[in-house]
Image (cartoon, coloured by chain):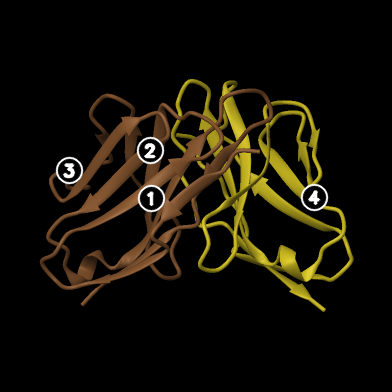
Chain colours: A brown, B yellow
Amino acid sequence: GAVVSQHPSWVICKSGTSVKIECRSLDFQATTMFWYRQFPKQSLMLMATSNEGSKATYEQGVEKDKFLINHASLTLSTLTVTSAHPEDSSFYICSARRTGLGYGYTFGSGTRLTVV
Amino acid sequence: DAKTTQPNSMESNEEEPVHLPCNHSTISGTDYIHWYRQLPSQGPEYVIHGLTSNVNNRMASLAIAEDRKSSTLILHRATLRDAAVYYCILRRGGNEKLTFGTGTRLTIIP
């Protein structure tokens, strides 16, 4: 199979602090990973594409200085929400695709961020 | 990216087949048709994908219209665990991004 592990599954932080979310591909290498955000009762919104060894590509309207992405290895991408505020509270989800016939995209289990 | 249209919600009885429709009238020749589902408070789960021919796997079947302007995800025998939001997504060949629409919320009636 193709497994993506995301950690932590939930986090509560104080306003103004930073939070790091990890996304690991456990049994395959991923040169590209994706970060999504999902607000309650809404669909997933793509935030950025994480590229191993190079800068992430952000979607329009996503602040790159606020949502720092690092993809330092073929199995790990991290998303850091800097100076978090209550409006950043959301469900963050990462995904990666194992190349080859028959494979779709595998998603992490998500991280519920609550900023108080 | 080409857009997909799905019903907001559907209901089906347990142990019966479910046919989830998806319209994608502006699909291009290099667009792959992907289906994912999401249970509450979880990340999406891959269901199936195809390009032109019908596809079967252990989870479901994907029936693609001859003109490719629509497709149907078929769950052969629904269980309560199949209750989820199902997303039909087009991914252009060479483009790695998946863009989610609003999906279909499937309710399974015991």
Residue on which the image places disc 2 = A76
Task: Please report whichever mark, 2 or 1, sits nearer to the chain's N-terminal start.
Answer: 1
Tell me the mark number nearer the camera, choosing from 3 and 4: 3
For residue A40, which quarter of the picture?
bottom left
The kind of residue on which mark 3 rests is Lys
| Labelled disc at residue A64 | 3
The residue that label 1 is drawn on is: A36
Q: CA distance from mark 3 to mark 1?
A: 14 Å
Point out residue B73 in the picture as x, y percentages from the top left corner. 74, 48
Judging from the image, what secondary structure is the residue with disc 1 in? strand
**Where is the C terminus of chain B found, in terms of image quarters?**
bottom right
Q: Amino acid at mark 2?
A: Leu
Q: Earlier in the sequence, mark 3 or mark 1?
A: 1
Q: Chain of mark 2?
A: A
- Residue type at numbered disc 4: Ile
Residue A19 locus on image (x, y percent):
23, 59
Q: Is residue A72 above or below residue B40?
A: above
The chain holding disc 1 is A
Nearer to us in this view, B69 or B107: B107
Q: Residues within 10 Å of mark 1 (few under 14, many from 20)?
A: many
Determine which quarter of the picture holds residue B4: top right
Give the structural element (helix, strand or loop) at label 2.
strand
Q: Are marks 3 and 4 in contact (CB under 8 Å)?
A: no
Q: CA distance from mark 2 to mark 1?
A: 16 Å
Residue tagged 4? B74
Q: CA distance from mark 1 to mark 4?
A: 27 Å
Marks 2, 3: nearer the viewer:
2
Mark 2 and mark 1 residues within 8 Å of each other at the beta carbon: no
